[in-house]
């Protein structure tokens, strides 16, 4: 306040120094304290103002200028009085107190929030204001003449500021905070920072100055009073997650720098201790016992071993190992990542008879170790005892597979080897042997059921198959379901039982004019056998052709031989083909040999030795088709010719089926013609009158033969055959009555089927017969005597409702239609 007073005095002295007319601002603060403290300053200002008026009165008479008497206005927020709150007074030097001046107010809140007395310039606030909503208002004021309304002064802007009071409590940015800190953290480890704000003016007093404190959470945590940072307050041994994991801390923020009377805001902070790997795993028991069947396969589970760890998550992950014992190579242990259990499994086959029990020591420790908490007690050890249970096992062969060898010329029944299997159980049951016939479909081998000897059932040939792979089954006598298989590989040893032959078919030509000793062909041999020392072939001419042969042979010593001429000239016309017999002998034991014939053809050559003309047989052999191809073409031609002849014969002897097969479906004299005819002389091929008068047609049969055809064969059946009276259909008259059409049809069909010369040759005749037994008799007009006779249709009324309309038409009297 003292500083404010000094500033005010200096301001008044400044105004007096420049001898200017100044408006004096009377500041009436709502604060009583301010009014009292500024009263002295106001008196001094009046004295200075009077002195100034005395010395400068003459200046007023010469010039007129605006002179407002004010300063910046201040107003306290949250006024609770019943009257308008007085702010201050506006006064212009144009106001001489004669009531001609009117004060006008405009700007923010003018007329609603702020009002002015237009006569004397007193300024009031009409309602309670809140600085946190709006801290200042900008208004404008002017004076006008009441009578003319003219402005006496230019409009001037001023500000009304609100003084803050402590009416807002601190508010935290979040109602609930969540933080975490590792367990066993050092004292003073930062956990989380909380922040609160106060809406009051921080530039005025201590209304917005906050101090943080902890009201709940002692003695584990503390808070910095200025920054709001929460820290641990206890040592590493006291902050153990396994003992207590969650804490709830209440933090207070108080304004007025924490003094009495300040407002307070609170927030809740939930703090959790995060886990560190400070606890080693421990087995739930010191000795574990398991039982496992000796038939367990590799990887089969024996049991699960449980260990606990107070830590959680990654810090609780464990690894199990076998550290000692007689089952280190027989068993294995792994960790189930889902349950963190040790899974003991079999790693080698078990045999109860050989070893009925095992003992191992297992160790457990954490996968991720924390060096800060590593000690000698970070591992735990337990003992595991495993008992092997005896089960009935299948026979066990002494080998995983067998290899047997036999010569390909071995006799049937010769043993080629043996297999052996025993029952591994203590009972030592007898074992019988058999061959899995799925591996020996040809039944080439067999095995003795008692001693396991494998012998031959059929002779073998190495050149057909050098290897045989069979499977032998060993089965217990007492329990046939217990059986095992073993593969047996049989290799056939080669025996020199095949004679060598030419390696290929050689086509040899020689010129008529040549020289003696000229090589005309080089031949080689092959042998299906495979001697261990390799092939060795010898070539020579056959003994019967050695002296009179026109050619000779020279063995090259490398399994090849050259064919040489013995004469200087040959005559193609005298002999065009020579056959040279070559004996090929192998070098194995027993020695095998064969005679191959080499065909040498004579050709005419030019003087340079190029062939110009050979015999026809040679040319066809060199440029035409081979013998096999010619035979194949000939066979195909013969087959095609046979098919054509068979097809033609079938067509000629194929019987035409009648169009109407059912005897009950017969029509009146329907004849289908499909014949080109025999010309003009074939006028009596089809006579429908034969159906009307079958007796006459039968007598004239001889005269109806085609005159252009001379029969070559006698009829197989007589022209006139009678049907037994008992075979005639009911309702059909006999031949004596001249109306037996059915018999006539049967006779005609039989004659045409049996006589190849009967006309027509390629026509289709369809004979229709209505049949007998009809109540209404035949409706055909063929047998009608006359159409002019009186007809009676009374029987139509007896045929039922379907013929009622027909009975009405034909059954009425003639008088009905007159």
Image (cartoon, rainbow, N blue to C red):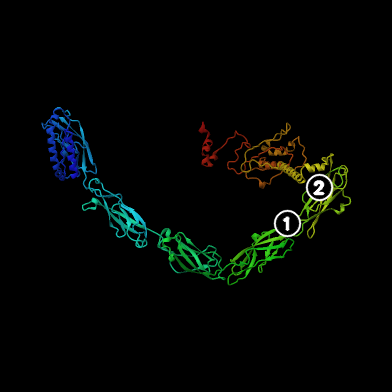
Residue 331: give x, y in percent of width and height. 52, 65
* Residue 266 appears left or right of 671: left
How many marks do you count on the picture?
Answer: 2
Give the numbered dot on residue 754. Answer: none
Question: In the picture, residue 703 is in which quadrant?
Answer: top right
Residue tagged by mark 2?
521
> Which residue is label 1 attached to?
463
The N terminus lies in quadrant? top left
Residue 91 left/right relative to 329: left
Q: Is residue 146 visible?
A: no
In the image, residue 808 above or below residue 262: above
Residues 502 and 322: in front is 322
In the displayed structure, 376 sits above or below 723; it is below
Label 2 element class: strand
- Tell me where residue 370 sits by quadrant: bottom left
Residue 749: tell me if it is visible: yes
Q: Residue 323's x, y, as percent?
A: 50, 66
Residue 197, percent from left and from top: 28, 48
């Amino acid at each position: 306040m003292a500083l404010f007073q000094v500033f005010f005095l200096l301001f008044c002295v400044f105004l007096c120094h420049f001898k200017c007319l100044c408006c004096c601002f009377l500041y009436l603060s709502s604060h009583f304290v301010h009014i009292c403290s500024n009263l002295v300053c106001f008196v001094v200002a009046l004295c200075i103002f009077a002195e100034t008026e005395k010395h400068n009165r003459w200046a007023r008479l010469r010039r007129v200028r605006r002179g407002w008497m004010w300063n910046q206005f201040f107003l306290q927020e949250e006024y609770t009085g019943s009257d308008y709150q007085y702010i201050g007074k506006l006064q212009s030097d144009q106001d001489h107190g004669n009531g001609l001046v009117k004060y006008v107010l405009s700007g923010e809140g003018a007329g609603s929030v702020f009002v002015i007395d237009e006569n004397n310039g007193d300024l009031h606030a009409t309602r309670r204001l809140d600085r946190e909503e709006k801290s200042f208002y900008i208004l404008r004021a002017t004076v006008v003449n009441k009578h003319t309304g003219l402005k006496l002064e230019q409009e001037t802007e001023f500000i009304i500021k609100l003084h803050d009071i402590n009416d807002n409590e601190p508010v935290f940015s979040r109602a609930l905070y969540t933080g975490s800190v590792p367990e066993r953290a050092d004292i003073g480890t930062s956990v989380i920072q909380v922040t609160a704000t106060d809406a009051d003016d921080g530039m005025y007093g201590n209304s917005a100055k906050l101090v943080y404190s902890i009201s709940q959470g002692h003695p584990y945590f503390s808070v910095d009073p200025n920054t709001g940072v929460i820290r641990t307050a206890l040592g590493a041994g006291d902050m153990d997650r396994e003992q207590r994991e969650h804490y709830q801390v209440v933090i207070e923020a108080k304004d007025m720098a924490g003094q009495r009377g300040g407002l307070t805001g609170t927030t809740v902070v939930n703090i959790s201790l995060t886990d560190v790997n400070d606890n080693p795993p421990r087995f739930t028991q010191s000795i574990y016992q398991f039982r496992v069947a000796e038939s367990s396969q590799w990887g089969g589970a024996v049991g699960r071993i449980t260990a606990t760890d107070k830590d959680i998550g990654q810090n609780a992950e464990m690894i199990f190992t076998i550290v000692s014992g007689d089952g280190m190579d027989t068993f294995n242990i792994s960790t189930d990542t889902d349950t963190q259990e040790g899974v003991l499994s079999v790693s080698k086959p078990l045999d109860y008879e050989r070893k009925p029990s095992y003992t191992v020591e297992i160790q457990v420790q954490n996968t991720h170790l924390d060096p800060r908490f590593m000690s000698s007690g970070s591992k735990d050890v337990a003992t595991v005892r495993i008992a092997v249970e005896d089960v009935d096992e299948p026979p066990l062969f002494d080998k995983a597979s067998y290899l047997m060898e036999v010569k390909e010329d071995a006799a049937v029944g010769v043993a080629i080897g043996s297999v052996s299997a025993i029952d591994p159980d203590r009972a030592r049951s007898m074992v019988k042997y058999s061959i899995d016939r799925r591996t020996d479909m040809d039944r080439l081998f067999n095995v003795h059921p008692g001693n396991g000897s494998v012998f031959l059932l059929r002779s073998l040939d190495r050149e057909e198959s050098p290897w045989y792979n069979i499977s032998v089954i060993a089965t217990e006598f007492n329990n046939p379901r217990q059986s095992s298989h073993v593969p047996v590989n049989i290799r056939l040893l080669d025996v020199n039982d095949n004679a060598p032959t030419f390696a290929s078919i050689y086509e040899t030509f020689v010129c008529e004019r040549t020289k003696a000793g000229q090589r005309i062909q080089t031949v080689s041999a092959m042998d299906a056998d495979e001697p261990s020392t390799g092939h060795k072939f010898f070539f020579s001419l056959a003994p019967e052709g050695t002296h009179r042969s026109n050619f000779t042979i020279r063995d090259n010593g490398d399994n090849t031989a050259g064919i040489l001429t013995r004469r200087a000239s040959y005559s193609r016309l005298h002999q065009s083909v020579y056959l040279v017999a070559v004996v090929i002998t192998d070098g194995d034991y027993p020695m095998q040999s064969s005679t191959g014939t080499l065909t040498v053809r004579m050709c005419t050559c030019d003087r340079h030795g190029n062939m110009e003309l050979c015999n026809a047989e040679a040319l066809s052999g060199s440029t035409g088709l081979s013998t096999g191809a010619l035979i194949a073409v000939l066979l195909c031609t013969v087959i095609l010719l046979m098919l054509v002849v068979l097809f033609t014969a079938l067509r000629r002897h194929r019987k035409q089926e009648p169009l109407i097969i059912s005897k009950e479906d017969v029509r009146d004299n329907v004849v289908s013609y499909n014949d080109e005819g025999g010309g003009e002389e074939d006028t009596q091929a089809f006579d429908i009158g034969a159906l009307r008068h079958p007796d006459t047609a039968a007598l004239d049969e001889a005269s109806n033969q085609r005159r252009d055809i001379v029969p070559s064969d006698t009829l197989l059946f007589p022209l006139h055959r009678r049907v037994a009276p008992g075979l005639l259909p009911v309702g059909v008259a006999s031949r004596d009555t001249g109306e037996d059409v059915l018999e006539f049809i049967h006779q005609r069909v039989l004659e045409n089927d049996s006589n190849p010369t009967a006309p027509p040759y390629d026509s289709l005749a369809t004979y229709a017969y209505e049949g007998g037994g009809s109540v209404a008799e035949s409706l055909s007009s063929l047998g009608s005597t006359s159409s002019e006779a009186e007809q009676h249709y009374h029987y139509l009324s007896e045929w039922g409702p379907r013929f009622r309309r027909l009975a009405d038409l034909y059954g009425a009297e003639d008088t009905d239609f007159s």
